Amino acid sequence: MADLNVELFGLRLDNPLILASGILGTTKGALASCAKAGAGAVTIKSITLEPRKGHKSPTLVEVEDGFLNAVGYSNMGLAEALCEFKNIKDVGVPVFASVVGKDAAEFAKLAAEMSRIKFAAIELPLSCPHTPGLGLLAGHGTPEATYGITKAVKKKTKLPVIVKLSPNVMNLGEVAKAAVKAGADAINMGNSVGPGMKINIEAKKSVLDYKAGGLTGPAIKPITVRCVYDVYEATKGKTPIIGTGGVTYGRDAIELMMAGATAVGVGTAVYYRGIKAFKYINNEIQVFTRKTGVSGLGELIGVAHR
């Protein structure tokens, strides 16, 4: 059987699957459940300085081959997060924090506070398409903002920093290079696409209360593959990439690795296949490697570029 372990910024993962932020990452217990189900690492739900209610319900609707969501970063806030995740090593696999702020100073403050806990890394989502004052609606998706936020955070933490980019920006390579120049230890490529909208034709109005939401799920995988490929090219394969968006089966994960991803984020698949999605996807990767004579995942990473 092939060895499924991969390495991110010196951190060894038993397999390449990482629970994406916002999916079952609200409590330490939920994270531990994903670890037991086969995740190689897990990411907590994004934390802001103060608690947030987020957008009003409905915040999620199933559409063709995916979901539209407009959650609006609802979360417990920094103070409660420091209590909830204080004994994070009990989870059993590496845990990544996720913090989101309005500007570089807020990101840096959150990173400094969350660094008091033994997280394996800190992720900076600069890519949400549907929350005013945060992400793309705060201008965080530009090379300049990406550089400034990443640089500010790197000054406040010794933990590895993962910068989560959006598939919606046109100059993606320049944004990725700005993150790396500022000290990013890895790129998480990507986030939801859009925003898009679904209208209830009987009610004659949008299903989501916020009207528009980001598209996730199998429908966006081809976009994720292209984005991972472009970031790998822009960074010359020297910065590890976590490919996130549309991974449901083992073949999806392998496709992203061939595009250049070292690890793979898993989110919507947990809805479609249950929490055992991690186990299923890992098993499917094993079947592929056995059939093709691959002894380790390093043989797959970036192979499409060669």
Image (cartoon, rainbow, N blue to C red):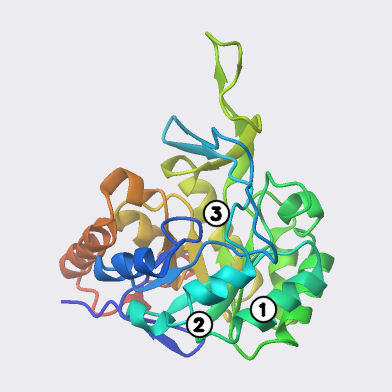
Question: Is disc 2 placed on a helix, strand or loop?
Answer: loop
Precedes in sequence: disc 2 or disc 3? 2
Residue that appears at 16% across and 65% down = 291
Between label 2 and label 3, give the one nearer the viewer: 2
In front of the other: 188 or 156: 156
Which amino acid does the dot numbered 3 rest on?
Answer: Arg
In the image shown, does 65 or 21 lie closer to the viewer? 21
Cα–Cα gap, marks 1 and 2: 11 Å
Mark 2 sits on what residue? 119
Instruction: Label 3: state its secondary structure.
Output: helix
Q: Earlier in the sequence, mark 3 or mark 1?
A: 1
Q: What residue type is disc 2 on?
A: Phe
The CA span between labels 3 and 1 is 30 Å
* Number of the label disc, if any, that sits on residue 111: 1
- Indicate the quadrant containing the N terminus: top left, top right, bottom left or bottom right: bottom left
Is residue 101 shown above or below 82?
Answer: above
Percent coordinates x, y for residue 9 in the rendering? 52, 86
**Percent position (x, y) of residue 210?**
66, 33
- Badge 2: how crowded within 10 Å, few (<14), some, or many (20+)? many
Mark before the other along the chain sequence, 1 or 2 = 1
Q: Which mark is residue 71?
A: none
Image: 131 above or below 113: above
- Name the residue nearer the viewer: 188 or 128: 128
* Residue 87 drawn at (x, y percent): 43, 83
* Mark 1 closeness class: few <14, some 14–19, many ≥20 residues within 10 Å: many
Residue that carries the numbered disc 3 in the rendered image: 226
Tell me which corner region of the image, top left, top right, bottom left or bottom right, holds residue 295: bottom left
Residue 233 in sight in this render: no
Is residue 264 visible to us here?
A: yes
Label 3 environment density (alpha carbons within 10 Å; few <14, some 14–19, many ≥20) = some
Residue at x-position 38% and y-position 67%:
31
